[in-house]
Image (cartoon, helix red, strand yellow):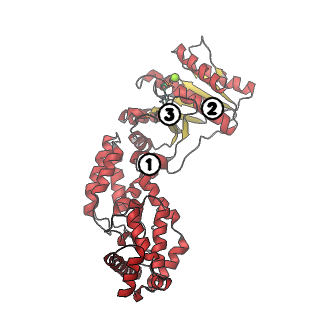
Amino acid sequence: NLSERLDRSFKLLKGEGKITEINVAETLKDVRKALLDADVNYKVAKQFTDTVKEKALGQNVLTSVKPSQLMVKIVHDELARLMGGTAIDVELKSSPAVILMSGLQGSGKTTFSGKLANMLKSKKGKNPLLVACDVYRPAAIEQLRVLGEQIGVPVYSEIDSKNPVQIALNAVKEARAKGHDLVIVDTAGRLAIDEQMMNEIAAIKKALNPDEILFVVDSMTGQDAVNTAKEFNERLDFNGVVLTKLDGDTRGGAALSIRSVVDKPIKFVGTGEKMDALDIFHPERMADRILGMGDIVSLVERAQEQYDEEEAKRLQKKIAKNQFDFNDFISQIQQIKKMGNLKELASMIPGVGKALKDIDIDDNAFKGIEAIIYSMTPAERSNPAILNGSRRARIAKGSGTSIQEVNKLIKQFDETRKMMKMMTAMKPGSKKLPSMR
Ligand code: GDP
Ligand code: MG
């Protein structure tokens, strides 16, 4: 699965400080392979990795974020960008506004028609009319009727007519007469691209001049979905894509390829058979899904949120003046603990992450450190230079640790302080977590 593959390849990322040509090449090869396996179109995958490479190379990795985490973030943001950036709504201008469904048989058009009517009715106060234009399968009309009943939306159909264009036109007339401000036209699909089907839906488009034509596609059909989308788009120039069946064990790759091959936004995702199983498409969330790494991404974001700007500025000054002391150290530890999972988060906190690098970071490790610092007097905490042998012995006793442990912490603290001072001298502003978006 794509997320596991990416996960593994990111773990291969070695190298500290900077993302370099060498440590990025292997990873990108894996990313590309993983994308191809997830049915992402070859050209799209290549383009994607090229862009990621460009963005990643030479990025300075600050102490707060590991190179692999930064890579994840870059890949994630690029995925989101590729899939459309922000969520896009349907545009309903005419009265009544007309939305036309297109797509292969079984893609989920009829189900989605019901879901969309339900959503626009309950969330936007629309008064929709559903129209059954599948004249080939009587069961299809019945299916839409049942759905309409469930959501309390009337369904227009003509049992005896074999002319979908005429049915659609009559439905719009009916909508006008009965005060519906929205007409959702469900159409017939075929199992594969078929000239007659295309002619038929093109004729409906011509007759109705719909506000929106939505292309509905089963997200489980992978690479086929891309080809289908391309053909429908060439013929209909649709406005947006609906990805259905995203509730199953779906390969997210289709979303990525469709978006970049037809350059039309994905607007909705279907996540189940029930009438409320419909979501507006959020590129960010889809990127999370494809990566399966939402936790890492949100981890980085969480760290950023929790990181108090003013505290950062204050620390910056203290570090520059070499005044960073054990009070700051302990408040940094508290910051880490506030954020939850210690092991993962420790490395994000400037300074502390480095200082704790050699320690097995779990609650116990923190307890020892905290105990030592709390056993210091305020004077010792703010002026570590006065920590002579007898003071250290007293602290060890008071904290229930050993002199060796106290010495080790003080040594690490000194090194951290030196390193931090060096860093701030080299790069003003590096105390701040890098801007992520
Ligand atoms: P149509 O031929 O394009 O009209 O497709 P249908 O709306 O009849 O859907 C085909 C099948 O897929 C039906 O069994 C639906 O219940 C099912 N289906 C549609 N959308 C979804 C979805 O988002 N999730 C799941 N799990 N099933 C769906
Ligand atoms: Mg149908």
Q: Residues within 10 Å of mark 3 (few under 14, many from 20)?
A: many
Task: Tell me the kind of residue under disc 1.
Answer: Asp
Name the side, left or right, on which 378 lies relative to 399: right
Task: Determine the residue positioned at 41% across, 89% down.
Answer: 386
- Front residue (pair 424, 251): 424
Per the model, the C-alpha gap separating discs 2 and 1 is 27 Å
For the question of whether residue 350 can be seen, the reply is no
- Residue furthest toward the top? 160
In this rendering, the answer to whether 277 lies above or below 342 is: above
Label 2: element kind: helix
> Which residue in the structure is indicated by mark 2?
118
Per the model, the C-alpha gap separating discs 2 and 3 is 18 Å
The answer to the question of whether label 1 and label 3 lie on touching residues, with beta carbons closer than 8 A, is: no
Task: Determine the residue positioned at 66% across, 26% down.
Answer: 153
Q: Earlier in the sequence, mark 2 or mark 3?
A: 2
Task: Tell me the kind of residue under disc 2.
Answer: Asn
Q: Position of residue 181 (x, y in %)?
A: 70, 32
Q: Position of residue 346 (x, y in %)?
A: 40, 65
Q: Residues within 10 Å of mark 1 (few under 14, many from 20)?
A: many
Label 3: element kind: strand
Q: Position of residue 37 (x, y in %)?
A: 31, 41
Q: Give the quarter of the image for residue 21.
A: bottom left
Task: Tell me the kind of residue under disc 3.
Answer: Phe
Circle number at residue 288 = 1
Circle number at residue 215 = 3
